[in-house]
Structures are given as structure tokens and as C-alpha cells.
Image: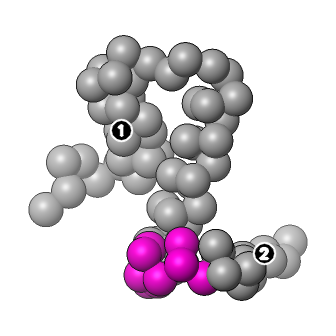
Amino acid sequence: MPFTNNQAEQDIRMAKVQMKVSGGWRTLEGANRWLLVRSYLSTARKRGLNPPSVLHDLFAGKVWLPPAAHA
């Protein structure tokens, strides 16, 4: 059962835990890279994809992108 049902809160929770455990990031670039990977994995997970498989494909050059939203 999720800690909360608020999806936005759940999405930022891991970043806050990372900051608390490590004391933060050494550089802005490092923080941006970490957040980019977290966002990529979070989106893949929400689409029902296996995160390790998505990462394996990414490093093999097969980038997964979610379908574009139509306005």
C-alpha cells in the first residue's frame, strides 16, 4: 500500500529521501543527472515497463519514449 495516494507527493519523495541520506548532491550537474534517471524510471514504471529492462535497452541504444500526448 502506498504511503500516500497523492501521486505528486510520491514522485518527489525519493528525491527527498536521497537528499536526507546523502546530505545532498555535490554539484548541480550531479543532481540534474540523478533526477533525469529517476524521472525516466518513474515514467517507465507508471507505463507498466520493467525498469531494469528499460535501462538495459537505454544503454544498448534503444531509447524508450512514452507516446506523445495530443492536445
The magenta-colored residue range is 48-57
Q: Please state which amino acid type lies under the numbered disc 2.
A: Ala
| Main SS category, magenta section | helix
Residue sitting farthest toward the right: 71
- Residue 5 in the image: state x and y as whole percent: 28, 53
Residue 43 occupies quadrant: bottom right
Question: 38 and 57: which one is in front?
Answer: 57
Residue at x 57% of width, y 53% of height: 37
- Residue 41 in the image: state x and y as whole percent: 50, 64
Q: Please state if 45 lies on the left or on the right of 70 as rendered.
A: left
- Residue 21 in the image: state x and y as whole percent: 27, 25
Numbered circle sitting on residue 13: 1
Q: Please state which amino acid type lies under the numbered disc 1.
A: Arg
Kindly indicate whether the residue at mark 1 contacts the one at mark 2 (C-beta within 8 angstroms). no
Q: Does residue 18 sit above or below 45 in this rendering?
A: above
- Residue at disc 2, secondary structure: loop
Question: 65 and 46: which one is in front?
Answer: 65
- Residue 69 in the image: state x and y as whole percent: 78, 75
Q: Please state if 53 lies on the left or on the right of 30 as rendered.
A: left
The answer to which of marks 2 and 1 sits earlier in the sequence is 1
